[in-house]
């Protein structure tokens, strides 16, 4: 929503109304945050005077141990439910677990093998390849495992070929229709294969499956969980969000030729990139299990984050990405930037015209700062600025706008209708000359000169819809780094108020990725896509949530909404229209909340770009007190 409208004095009325309606748990306090979040400053002032503790609003702040005790407990009742569910599967599937080893820690190896043998789903084959271990006890241990369980198959190599060669050797002995990768010191959750089989049973068209993961130390303590979102190719191009647990259809691996030597360390990442090239609609064929099914062993002091990479591994990942882009004829190049990979898409040789739409009413200092910062700091050359003057009556503002009439880059569209942010922008889009339109608040100030190059290079990609920018408050903290639906009852800005350099959850505040929505305070999209989905909803969402609803409709139409940290701007989030506190406007805001819940329903709390294991109570991606995941053994779950 454009921050042109402020509504003080609504907190108590909204709270009473929502409580009277018996809304969702916490709706009253969430509504307070929605107001503040969207720049409705009057209510925000009142909220600021209350402590978050007094409001009952804030992150769960539970540690992972407490989270596990509440959300990841296994008992005999759950096991019975899982076994009962397995009997309903339409077709049996066998998993071949590929496990290369080279002089492993024998105690950890024992735990790894036992984690496989304890699987609740019993149709598996463990293919262990000893890659020329020099410790004679390794062979003895492996022989002992194979003797104890005939599902364990051994292959001993006389020469060390490293992980890709060893995995390919294991593939030649794999008889299952699905492949699972397992390191010789890691462990599987006992329900790991069951969850994969359940997903396949629910959707036989699935080709790749991945799960959440955590780390485990030498003493068996679990820590550093990575709760992932559903398939997000833009985030995958930024770092390996697939990783562990990875489950692959065997026929697909055979088609792409297995693992490629020379990509050790990113061999699974390279494999997934090549698999994507043979999958058609990858979004439908890649399934995410939102459960921790894989425990990665790490030594004390070893980096816990999957983002960590040495220079050799990072360069191999860059090479895998760039070769993938070349094979798919995508005009893009990747580079390693420390937090992950940055993919830079090429702009067309003839730059498309961009119409920057800036609605305003009065607000001389803001609109002048906005226009002048665009003119002075934007390196993209083919753009026009379309100022929508919504009834300005301040003489100084009118004089300034009059000076812009003869500017070849700036046009002014006078629109005196009652304030309706959606209608103002829709009319401006209709009058725009560009094939790309950018919705820009009048309180935006450019920071990075290449901001528009970056956003347009993403917006011209045929599968991408809306593109959002990294917006900062004047104090340098984050105002917008993507929108997560469900936060605050409708939607919220993730990482809001974090420091500018904050990495975010597993680096996401520094990585390009898809989100369900991005703010219209600075949004770039192809004009044809804007018109295709009907623009902003000027009938039901005149002021609030119009950008959220718009982005959700863009996603519903089959496009990805992408946020980039490489387009940075200040968002001063200031009032330009005075206060709105009339009963009519209060009713309008409440009706906009009703509309969002009526139009999108439970989908607001099921954001595919966010994990159901993370909180909707705050914007910091902390752990949810109660995970929004179906119980194990649930016949409808598929997870």
Image (cartoon, rainbow, N blue to C red):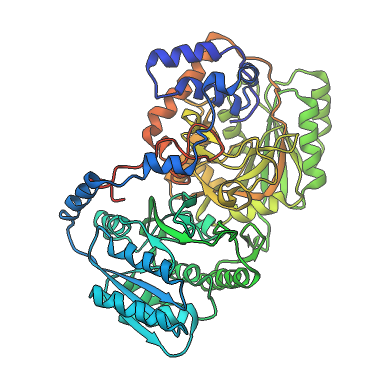
* 551 displayed left or right of 37: left
* Residue 280 occupies quadrant: bottom left
Q: Residue at x 48, y 50 (%)?
A: 225
Image location (x, y in percent) of residue 169? 38, 83
Residue 536 appears in the rendering:
no
Q: Residue at x 33, y 76 (%)?
A: 127
Between residues 277 and 200, which one lies in front from this camera angle?
A: 200
Task: Tell me if residue 2 comes above or below residue 72 in the rendering.
Answer: above
Between residues 33 and 276, which one lies in front from this camera angle?
A: 33
Image location (x, y in percent) of residue 132? 45, 85
* Residue 258 occupies quadrant: bottom left
Image location (x, y in percent) of residue 395? 82, 19
Q: Residue at x 63, y 26 (%)?
A: 39
Between residues 300 and 324, which one lies in front from this camera angle?
A: 300
Image location (x, y in percent) of residue 283? 41, 56
Task: Tell me if residue 90 comes above or below residue 68 in the rendering.
Answer: below
Which quadrant holds the N terminus?
A: top right
Q: Residue at x 37, y 68 (%)?
A: 110
Farthest residue toward the top? 583
Q: How many marks?
A: 0
* Residue 343 occupies quadrant: bottom right
Task: Tell me if residue 577 comes above or below residue 613 in the rendering.
Answer: above
């Amino acid at each position: 929503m454009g921050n042109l409208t402020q509504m003080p004095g609504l907190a108590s009325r909204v709270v009473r109304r929502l409580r009277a309606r018996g809304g969702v748990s916490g709706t009253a306090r969430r509504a307070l945050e929605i107001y503040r979040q969207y720049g409705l400053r009057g209510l925000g002032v009142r909220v600021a005077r209350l402590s978050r503790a007094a409001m009952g609003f804030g992150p769960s702040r539970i540690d992972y141990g407490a989270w596990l005790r509440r959300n990841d407990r296994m008992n005999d009742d759950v096991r019975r439910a899982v076994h009962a569910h397995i009997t309903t599967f339409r077709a049996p599937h066998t998993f071949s677990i590929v496990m290369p080893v080279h002089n492993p820690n024998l105690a950890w190896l024992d735990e790894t093998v036992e984690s496989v043998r304890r699987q609740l789903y019993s149709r598996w084959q463990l293919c262990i390849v000893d890659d020329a271990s020099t410790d004679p006890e390794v062979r003895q241990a492996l022989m002992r495992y194979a003797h104890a369980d005939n599902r364990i198959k051994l292959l001993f190599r006389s020469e060390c070929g490293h992980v890709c060669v060893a995995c390919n050797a294991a593939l030649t002995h794999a008889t299952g229709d699905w492949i699972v990768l397992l390191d010789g010191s890691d462990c599987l959750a006992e329900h790991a294969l069951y969850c994969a089989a359940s997903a396949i049973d629910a959707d036989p068209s699935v080709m790749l499956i991945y799960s959440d993961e955590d780390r485990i130390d030498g003493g068996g303590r679990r820590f550093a969980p990575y709760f992932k979102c559903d398939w997000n190719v833009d985030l995958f191009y930024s770092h390996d969000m697939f990783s562990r647990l990875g489950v692959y259809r065997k026929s697909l691996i055979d088609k792409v030729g297995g693992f490629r030597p020379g990509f050790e360390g990113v061999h699974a990442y390279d494999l997934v990139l090549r698999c994507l090239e043979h999958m058609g609609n990858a979004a439908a064929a890649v399934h995410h299990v939102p459960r921790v099914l894989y425990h990665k062993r790490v030594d004390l002091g070893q980096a816990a984050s999957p983002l960590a990479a040495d220079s050799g591994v990072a360069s191999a990942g860059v090479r895998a990405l760039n070769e993938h882009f070349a094979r798919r004829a995508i005009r893009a190049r990747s580079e390693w930037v420390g937090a992950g990979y940055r993919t830079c898409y090429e702009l067309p040789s003839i730059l498309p015209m961009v119409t920057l739409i800036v609605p305003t009413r009065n607000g001389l200092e803001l609109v002048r700062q906005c226009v002048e910062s665009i003119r002075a700091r934007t390196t993209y050359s083919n753009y026009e600025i379309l100022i929508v003057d919504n009834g300005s009556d301040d003489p100084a503002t009118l004089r300034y706008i009059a000076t812009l009439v003869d500017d070849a880059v700036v046009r002014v569209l006078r629109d005196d209708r009652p304030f309706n942010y959606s209608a103002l922008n829709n009319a401006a889009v209709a009058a725009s000359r560009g094939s790309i339109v950018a919705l820009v608040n009048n309180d935006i100030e450019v920071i990075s000169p290449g901001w528009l190059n970056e956003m347009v290079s993403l917006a011209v990609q045929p599968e991408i819809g809306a593109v959002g920018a990294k917006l900062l408050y004047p104090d340098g903290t984050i105002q917008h780094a993507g929108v997560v639906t469900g936060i605050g009852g409708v939607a919220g800005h993730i990482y809001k108020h974090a420091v500018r350099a904050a990495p975010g959850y597993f680096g996401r505040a520094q990585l390009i990725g898809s989100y369900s929505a991005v703010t219209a305070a600075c949004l770039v999209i192809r004009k044809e896509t804007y018109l295709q989905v009907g623009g902003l909803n000027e009938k039901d969402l005149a002021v609030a949530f119009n950008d959220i609803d718009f982005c959700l409709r863009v996603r519903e139409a089959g496009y990805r909404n992408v946020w980039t940290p490489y387009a940075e701007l200040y968002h001063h989030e200031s009032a330009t229209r005075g206060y709105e506190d009339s009963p009519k406007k209060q009713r309008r805001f409440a009706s906009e909340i009703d509309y969002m819940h009526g139009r999108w329903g439970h989908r607001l709390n099921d954001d595919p770009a966010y994990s159901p294991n993370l909180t909707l109570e705050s914007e910091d991606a902390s752990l949810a007190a109660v995970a929004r995941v179906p119980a194990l053994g649930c016949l409808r779950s598929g997870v």
